[in-house]
Amino acid sequence: MRVLVIGSGGREHALVWKLAQSTRINAIWCAPGNGGIGSERLLTNGSLVQCARIAVDDFATLSQFARDQRIDLTVVGPDNPLAEGVVDFFQAEGLRIWGPNKRAALFEASKVFAQQFMERHQIPTARAGTFQDAEAARKFAALLGGRCAVKADGLALGKGVLICRSPDEADAAINQILLGKTFGEAGRQIVIQELLEGIEISLHAICDGKTALLFPTSQDHKRALDHDQGLNTGGMGAYSPTPFLTPEKMAEISRLILDPWLKGCAAEGINFHGLLYPGVMLTQDGPKVIEFNARFGDPETQVYLTRLENDLLDLLEASVDGTLDRIELKWSDSSSVCVIMASGGYPGAYQKDLPITGLESAAEVPNVKIFHAGTAFAEGKFRTAGGRVLGITAWGKTLSLARNRAYEAARRVHFEGAHYRTDIGSKAL
Ligand code: AMP
Ligand code: GLY
């Protein structure tokens, strides 16, 4: 089979790396890809993965490419093309593609839709209201004592959520989004949720419209600095499994969250083929969904796929074809940890095009895989090309073994200004 992966981050590198181990794939393309993706070789024939310089939102060129290269399956990584309907576009052209269609992607693309869906189908979530009117929004926030999360409805590069702890902060957030229009059209409506206390985990379930198979737990680290200080980022590191949920509790999560979600989708005619990624707060009153994403998490994918023992192509095809009920997910007993090495200044402004050294030495640490995110490769050298640069991923029998390996590898990699958190996975130890 010939496969095209859309995207250019660490998540897509992990998807490509895992697909390259499939016994049924003999060509992989990635659009646009990154410096590391083009260095992967296929298990079947040793050929290199190839990157195609096509933007993720250029559907016409992507679909033409898929036709020209006789691609059998296109796999979509990022949220934006899904929200804009890349799946519908490909399907209308008779092309096979993995990911939710535009309507199904609304779970991530519209927080108002997701919140109201959860309320319609009794999925446990935060107490919340949705607003277009600033005065009504302020009244609701005041009822919560100002302790709330104010969220722009649409996609806002992961920056559309403002956490508030006083009525003044809530007023400022509401004004900023609804009146100041900082997020443009994405902030025409907002969701205000009560602030939940607890441990936040990531769940992933692969879905085919009828069946949802739940992955083990993982945990992301969204703040830039150790001990959850600093600004929110796309994710500074992840590990899996987490020790917070027993198998019994996982079964309960399936019953409380996935069952009503599947039933709700069926009742509303939403045909979700893809990856559902609920962000869940484990509160004293049980698990509560704070948001849905409609794609693999980044960097959760890096830790999941270094533990997954199935052929990823089997899962993605079953998700497209509606045959996930015939699949059993298999995970290694080991723990995986991913430490993100970021550019100096990220998530604020940062310099690009800095040389990266030490990658070969880092790759010699046992059970380590370095996934590239913001890198470019030219004239035999890797250089930085984004905020999150590398996802240094390691696995081992225990979480501490995996962590030690990831950090040993991270210490061997250098670029000017590089920074990473030193406490990834420490909440579990
Ligand atoms: P989201 O994009 O909805 O995941 O929000 C970004 C981050 O804000 C989440 O990862 C949480 O850490 C935090 N957050 C969002 N909603 C809530 C909430 N209702 N209570 C507490 N924290 C929240
Ligand atoms: N792990 C954060 C995200 O993928 O949105």
Image (tube, helix red, strand yellow):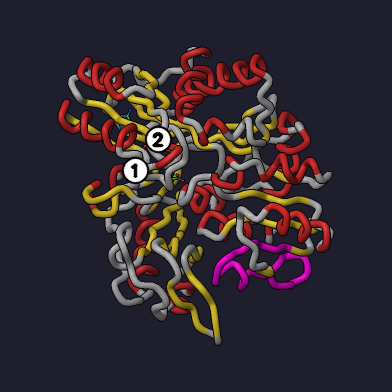
Tag 2 residue: 187
Amino acid bearing label 1: Thr
The answer to whether 22 is drawn above or below residue 270 in the figure is: below
Q: Main secondary structure of the magenta part?
A: loop
Where, quadrant-wise, is the N terminus in this rendering? bottom right
Tell me which segment is drawn in magenta.
Answer: 28-48
- For residue 83, what is the image quadrant? top right
**Relative to the observer, which residue lies in front, 426 or 142?**
142
Q: Position of residue 37 (x, y in %)?
A: 59, 67
- The tag on residue 410 is none
**Relative to the observer, which residue lies in front, 233 or 411?**
233
- C-alpha separation, residue under disc 1 versus residue under disc 2: 7 Å
Task: Check if mark 1's residue and mark 2's residue have beta carbons within 8 Å.
Answer: yes
Q: Position of residue 88 (x, y in %)?
A: 72, 39
Q: Secondary structure at mark 1?
A: loop
* 420 lies left or right of 353: left
Amino acid bearing label 2: Gly
Tag 1 residue: 182
Any magenta on residue 83? no
Any magenta on residue 45? yes
- For residue 403, what is the image quadrant? bottom left
* 132 lies left or right of 194: right
Count every numbered label the image shows and give the total. 2
Farthest residue in the front direction?
Answer: 179
Quick check: can you spot residue 314?
Answer: no
